[in-house]
Image (cartoon, rainbow, N blue to C red):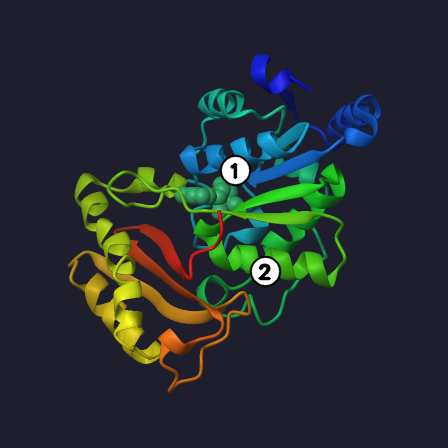
Amino acid sequence: MTASLTAAPAIVRTIAELRMQIKDYRRQAGEHASVGLVPTMGYLHEGHASLLRRSAADNGLTVLSIFVNPLQFGPNEDFDRYPRDEARDLAVAADAGADIVFMPSVGEMYPRPAATRVTVSGVSERLCGASRPGHFDGVGVVVTKLFNIVQPDKAYFGMKDAQQVAVIERMAGDLNQPVDIVPCPIVREADGLALSSRNVYLSETERSEALVLSATLARVPEWIAADATAERLKAAVTAGIAASPLADIDYVDVLTFPDMQPPQADLKLSDSRERLLVAVAVRFGRTRLIDNILIPAAEA
Ligand code: AMP
C-alpha cells in the first residue's frame, strides 16, 4: 500500500468503519498484509511521529489512534484540560506515514461504562502505578480494546513511558494477545527535554528548570560506574533534581526492567545482571513530567 506516501490518511471515527477499512486492506494485501497500531492521546509531536514512521516502515497499513482515555485519568488529573488539536495532529500523522487515523468519541469507545478492568499486578504497582491509582488498569482496558478492534500485527509504544511498555508486554504475554509489542526509544528536544504533549503547559521558567531531569539522568551511568547501590543512586538523582528550586519530586526510583522490582539493597548496580530502569516523576508548577533512563540502553 502506497497511500502513506501520497494521500492524506483516512479519518475514521467509528469502530465499525475502522474494522471495515482494515478488512478491506487485509483482503487486498492478502498474505503480505501487515497492520501496525500506534496508540496515542493526540497533540502529536516528534515522539509520536517516530513511532508512526517505524510502523510505516514495518507494515503495509499503519493505524494511528487518538483517544484521550478517561479511564486512565484520576479524578484530580488533567483529563479536561489535556491539550487537543485535531488539524495539527492530522498534518503530523500524514507526514509521518499514518494510513488511518482513528479518532473515536468517548461514547464510541465506552457506550456504557466499562465494568471490566485489566490489572497487571507486580509491574504496575510502583512508580506511576503507585502515584496514579487505577491508571494502568485504565491503560490495560483501552489498549486491549484497541488490540481487539484493530487486531494489529505490531503495536508501537515509546520508552518515554517505560513502565507502560512493561505493563503492556506483560499483559500481551499473559493473555496471549496476538500482537508484537515494539518498544521505541525516547525522543528528546535538542536540549535534552523529553518530548511530551504536556510540555505545552510549562511556563518558560518551568521549561528551562525541567532540563534538570534529562541532565541528571544523563549522569546515571557515571554514578553506576562509581559503584552506586540503588539507595545511593536514588539519593544522587534526588539531589541532582532538587537543585532546581521549582522541582517538586513525586518519585525517583531504581527498578529492574521489565519486572519493575527493586534491585537487591547491597548490590553494586554495576554488577547487576538485570537491566535497570531509573525513573522519575516531577512536578514543575501544575505540570507533572516523567523521564527515565534504561541501563543498558534498549536496542533501537
Ligand atoms: P501519549 O499520547 O502521551 O499517550 O503517547 C502515545 C505514545 O507515544 C506512547 O507509547 C508514548 O510512550 C509515546 N511517546 C510519547 N512521548 C514520547 C517521546 N518523547 N519519545 C518516544 N515516544 C514517546
| Residue 162 position within the rendered picture, expressed as x and y whole percent measured from the top left | 48, 56
Distance from mark 1 CB to nearest ligand 1 atom below 8 Å: yes
Q: Which residue is mark 2?
A: 167
> Image quadrant for the N terminus?
top right
Residue drawn at x 43%, y 55% is 76
Q: Which residue is mark 1?
A: 51
| Residue 174 position within the rendered picture, expressed as x and y whole percent measured from the top left | 72, 63
| Residue 239 position within the rendered picture, expressed as x and y whole percent measured from the top left | 20, 69
* Depth order, front residue of 126/296: 296
Circle 2: residue type: Val
Q: Residue furthest bottom?
A: 266
* Depth order, front residue of 287/154: 154
Q: Decide: few, some or many residues near mark 2? Use Cα within 10 Å; few <14, some 14-19, many ≥20.
A: many
Q: Secondary structure at mark 2?
A: helix
Lateral position of residue 147 relative to residue 214, left or right? right
Q: Which of the 4 quarters of the picture holds residue 62?
A: top right
Q: Where 180 sits versus 220, above or below?
A: above
Distance from mark 2 CB to nearest ligand 1 atom below 8 Å: no
Residue drawn at x 75%, y 40% is 151
Residue drawn at x 30%, y 50% is 286
Q: Decide: few, some or many residues near mark 1? Use Cα within 10 Å; few <14, some 14-19, many ≥20.
A: many
Residue drawn at x 68%, y 40% is 109
